[in-house]
Amino acid sequence: MSSPVTSPHERSKPKIAVLGSINMDLVIRCDRLPKPGETVAARSMTEVPGGKGANQAVAAARCGGAVQMIGRVGDDGFGQKLLNNLLQESIDCSAVLTAQGCESGLAIVSVENSGENAIIVIPGANARLSAEDIHRSESILADCDVLMVQLETPQPTVLAGIQAAKRAGAKVILDPAPAATLAEALFDVDLICPNESEATAIVGGRLETIDDAAEIAKRLHAKGPAAVAITLGARGTMLYDGQTAELIKSIKVDAVDTTAAGDAFAGAVAVRWAQTGSLRQAIQWANLAGALAASRAGAQPSLPTHQQIDSLSS
């Protein structure tokens, strides 16, 4: 009698470390955005846990990873709320430190009826995440399968994390968001996964066609990453591994809110790549995660579970 087939999720629970930002998003809804010097009445205000680091940690946890978060919150009223939110997702927060006399990261998001928005970001405690914090977390980086990093914490801190993870033999995934000028050493990663605007911000040029995406992926690869995956929304993802450029198609969905689609994609890639060893297979699965997130409202509330992604792929 043959053995039952075991899913990747049952075979292993990969160890994912996430070094990044932890924010509280204050989402304010109004009929229209105020002009300079003008006061308008808002209809509502909602507190929504966010930050690209925290979003990707939640995404990876829901995809089946054993996730440890490395970051900072403030000693204000939001700090404990943000920690509790991560703990509810079964994320290990032993390496999340509290910055004394400092506010937590905060994003004030004003959204008018048309969908147009205006965002003010206060880095707060995220700006205090230091290379020393990374050194204190080296045991986590030495034991993880994949480290995920973004650019909402200081670049020297991100670089310290990349170097520590590389020394330990872990895979490193860089989501270069928000778009910024990157130090050359930051490209020494196993995968960089920008969206279209981030990719062109880094290497210039226009990205309109699939051929454009392949060319920009090659130019990004020349900067140092082992592989490049440019997310192209509904068109899918352009993967370049140094030899072959391939468009890995996604599925069509009715997009409701694309805010956390990239975070869903990154978290899913990290988990499935660690489980299977196949980057192509990981991106196929992650495309589904991104599509599911785009079809739902909100950031963290839209992030899918591995069961939901698997049901879409079956």
Image: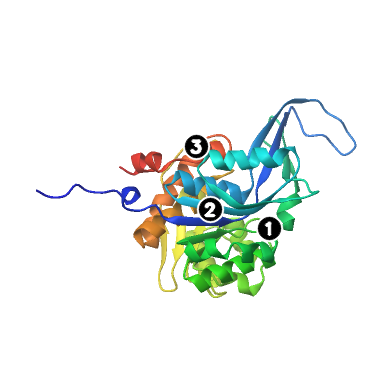
Which amino acid type is marked by label 1? Thr
Q: Position of residue 109 (x, y in %)?
A: 72, 39
Label 1 vs 3, first from the N-terminus: 1
The residue that label 2 is drawn on is 68
Q: Which residue is mark 1?
A: 153
Q: Residue at x 48, y 49 (%)?
A: 60
Residue flagged by tag 3: what amino acid is it?
Answer: Ser
Distance from disc 1 to disc 3, alpha carbons, whole Å, reads 28 Å
Q: Secondary structure at mark 2?
A: strand
Q: Earlier in the sequence, mark 1 or mark 2?
A: 2
Q: Residues within 10 Å of mark 2 (few under 14, many from 20)?
A: many
Q: Position of residue 213 (x, y in %)?
A: 51, 62
User: Is residue 237 placed above or below 234 in the rendered structure?
Assistant: below
Name which of mark 2 and mark 3 comes first in the sequence.
2
Q: Residue at x 57, y 60 (%)?
A: 207
Query: Is residue 277 among what the camera can see?
Result: yes
| Label number found at residue 295 | 3
* Residue 195 in sight: no
Q: Which one is in front, 112 or 292?
A: 292
